[in-house]
Amino acid sequence: MNTFEIIMLVLIIISLILNIILLLKNKKPSNANLDFLERLGRFEVNITKEFGNFKNDLEKEMSNNFLKVNDKLETKLNEINNKVNSRIDENFEKTNKTFINVLERLSKIDEAQKKIENLSIDIVSLENILTDKKTRGIFGEVNLYNILKNVFGEKNDLIYKTQYKLSNGYIADSVVFAPNPLGTIAIDSKFPLEAYRVMVDKKKSDIERNLAFKQFKLDVKKHIDDINYKYIIDGETSNQAMMFIPAEAIFAEINAYHSDLVEYAYKKRVWLTSPTTLISTLSMIMMIIQNIERDKYTNIIHEELNKLGIEFTRFKERFDKLSKSILTVNKDVEAFTITTDKIKKKFDNISSVKVEDNNLIQLDEDNN
C-alpha cells in the first residue's frame, strides 16, 4: 500500500469510530456499554498515537523526499545554469568576433569609399583632359609608347622608333621594323571621342544621338583615309599601316556595331587596333623576329660545327702520326733499356770480383 491508501484507510477507521461513539452517546449507558466505551477509548488513544507516529514518519519521509528532490533540482539547475553560461559565453565570443569583422569591413568600406571618391575625382580630371583634341592626341601617343616599350623594350631602335619622319614629310607616331615581307609598319594614334560620347549618351535626344552616330562614322573614315595617304609608301613602308585606338570601348563599338567601318579599313589596308589587340599583334611580330634571329644563329652554329669537324679530322690525322712516332720511340726506348740492363750487369759482375793468391781472379757469375 502506498502512502495515500494508508491515509485513506486511517480516515475511514476514524470516521467509523466517531460514528460508533455518537451512537453510544445517544443510548443509555450500561456495564457492557461502559466496558465497550473503555475499550473504545483505549483504541482511540492507540489509534491517535499510531496516527501521530504515522504523521511524524510521513513528515520525515516527505521532508527527506523534499530534500532529495531539492538536491536534484539544485543539481539540474546548476547544470542548466552552467550550460546557459557556456552558451552565453560562446555566443558572446561569436558576437564579439562578428562585431570585430563588421568593424574591419566597415573600415575597408570606408577606405574603398575614399578610393572611389579619389577615383571619381581622377575620372573627372581625365574627362576634362580628354575634352581637348591635342591632349587626347598626347594621351594616345603615351599609351602607344608604353605598349611598344613593354613589348620590345625601352629604346630598341633596331625594332621600333617613335616620331619617325617618312620621305613624304609626314611624321608617324611610331614605326615597327618588322621582318620581310611585312617591312616597316607605321602606327598612328587616333581618338574619335567627341561624337562617340554623344552617341552613347542616353540622356541625349534621339536626333542628337543619330547626328553623332553619322559624325562618328565620318570621323573614323577620315582617320583611316589619313593613315592610308600619309603612312603607306611604296618601296619604303609596308603596304599596310595600323590605326591605334587608345579606348577599348570605342574599338568594341566599331567592331560590334559598325562592320562597314571595319570593311572600309580593310580596303584601305589599315589595321584597327586597341591596346589589347595591339599588344597581341606586336608580341607576334616580336616572336617572329626572335625566331628569325634564332634561325640566323642556328645557321652560324651549323657552319662553325662543320669547320670544327674539319679541324677535328686534321687533329685525328696528326694524332695518328704522333702515335706512330711514339710507338717507334717506345721501341727504341725498350732496346735502349735492354742495353742499359746488360751494361749494369757487367758493372755488377766487375764489382763482385774476388782476388786469391794475388793471381787468381774468380767471377761469381758467368759473363754474358
Image (tube, grey):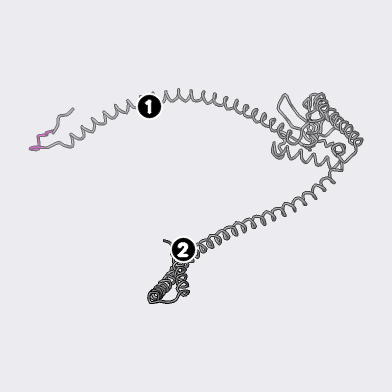
Q: Does the magenta stretch include residue 361?
A: yes
The circle drawn on residue 326 is 1
Check the picture and name the quadrant holding the C terminus.
Answer: top left
Label 2 to label 1: alpha-carbon separation: 134 Å
State left or right for residue 19 relative to residue 97.
Answer: left
Up the image or down, 298 lies above or below 103; here it is above
Mark with earlier residue (2, 1): 2
- The image position of residue 51, as x and y in percent, is 43, 71
Check the picture and name the quadrant holding the N terminus.
Answer: bottom left
State left or right for residue 83 relative to residue 358.
Answer: right
Up the image or down, 60 lies above or below 266; here it is below
Q: What stretch is highlighted in magenta?
A: 355-363
Local SS, label 2: helix
Toward which corner of the image does residue 191 lie, by quadrant? top right
Viewer-proximal residue among 290 and 279 = 279
- The image position of residue 59, as x and y in percent, is 45, 70
State left or right for residue 160 relative to residue 329.
Answer: right
- The image position of residue 323, as x and y in percent, is 39, 25
Residue type (three-letter) at the residue carrying disc 2:
Phe
Q: Is residue 161 magenta?
A: no
Mark 2 sits on what residue? 4
* Disc 1 packing (10 Å; few <14; some 14–19; many ≥20): few
Question: Which residue is located at x 42 percent, y 23 percent?
Answer: 320
- Which residue of the protein is positioned furthest toward the right in this rendering? 207
Is the Cβ of the residue at disc 2 closer than 8 Å to that at disc 1?
no
Local SS, label 1: helix
